[in-house]
Image (tube, rainbow, N blue to C red):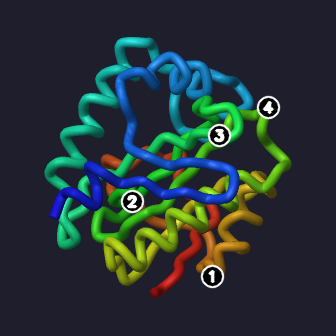
């Protein structure tokens, strides 16, 4: 069953979406350290070593994922034109509610404004519903992140309001953010 995770390959008109590989480390680190990207993430810049550990952890998650229990599906987004890594997307238990599966995506700032986040997220949404057979997806976005709010709306996700509660061990960053959901 882990084949749909370990060997995941999603193609769109302009990109290939596939699991992280160790050769992605420097590109992932560059994007994950960009101040424009970090503006809307609860993370600090990650070191090369931390990125490599995330890749190793992600590969392990892909091997243990099942349709019934999704640990994390971290995927690299590559441009078909340049074959360069331009972002990431994925699915995993939501930090604020582990019983729900969150969809997430990030595109490098030099590629913003071209509809790539929407294209990648839509392809991943379809994979989640058709191949993994998830019944529901959620997404959370900073109120002032207009572009990302539009992405979730274009996916057909319904605005549920602002996230008001989260477990004590959850990063308070998520509180007050816009919450969206979509059922299959």
Judge by depth and name the residue closer to the eye, 64 or 139. Answer: 64
Residue 145 in picture, x, y percent from top left: 75, 52
Quarter of the figure with residue 31 = top right
Mark 3 crowd level (few <14, some 14–19, many ≥20, 10 Å Cα): some
Position of residue 24 relative to residue 149, above or below, is: above
Which residue sits furthest top? Answer: 48
Where residue 43 appears, as percent x and y from the top left, is 51, 32
Give the answer, above or below, for where 69 lies relative to 142. below
Residue highlighted by disc 2: 94
Task: Looking at this view, name the residue that lies furthest to the front.
Answer: 81
User: Which of marks 3 and 1 precedes in the sequence?
Assistant: 3
Q: Nearer the viewer, mark 4 or mark 3?
A: 3
Q: CA distance from mark 4 to mark 3?
A: 13 Å
Q: Of callouts 4 and 3, which one flags the residue occurring earlier in the amino acid sequence?
A: 3
Between circles 4 and 2, the one closer to the viewer is: 4
How far is mark 2 from mark 3, CA to CA? Answer: 27 Å
Q: Is residue 175 left or right of residue 132?
A: right
> Which secondary structure, mark 4?
helix
CB within 8 Å, label 1 to label 3: no
Classify residue 94 as left or right of residue 142.
left
Q: Which residue is mark 3?
A: 79
Residue hosting label 1 = 158
Q: Residue at x 43, y 12 (%)?
A: 48
**Lower sequence index among marks 4 and 1:** 4
Tag 4–tag 1 contact (CB < 8 Å): no
Distance (Cα) linking label 4 and label 1: 29 Å
Say which label, 2 or 3, has the lower sequence index: 3
Q: In this figure, which residue is indicated by the disc labeled 4?
A: 110
């Amino acid at each position: 069953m882990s084949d749909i995770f370990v060997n995941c390959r999603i193609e769109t008109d302009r990109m290939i979406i596939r699991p992280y590989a160790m050769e992605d480390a420097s590109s992932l680190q560059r994007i994950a350290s960009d101040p424009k990207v970090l503006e809307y993430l609860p993370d600090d810049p990650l070191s090369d070593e931390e990125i490599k550990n995330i890749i190793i952890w992600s590969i392990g998650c892909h091997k243990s994922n099942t349709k019934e229990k999704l640990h994390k599906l971290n995927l690299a987004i590559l441009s078909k034109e340049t074959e360069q890594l331009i972002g990431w997307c994925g699915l995993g238990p939501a930090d604020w509610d582990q019983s729900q599966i969150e969809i997430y995506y990030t595109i490098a700032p030099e590629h913003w404004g071209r509809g790539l986040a929407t294209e990648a997220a839509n392809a991943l949404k379809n994979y989640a519903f058709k191949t993994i057979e998830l019944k529901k997806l959620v997404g959370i976005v900073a109120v002032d992140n207009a572009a990302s709010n539009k992405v979730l709306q274009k996916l057909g996700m319904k605005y549920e309001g602002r996230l008001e509660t989260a477990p004590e061990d959850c990063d308070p960053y998520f509180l007050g953010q816009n919450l969206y959901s979509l059922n299959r």
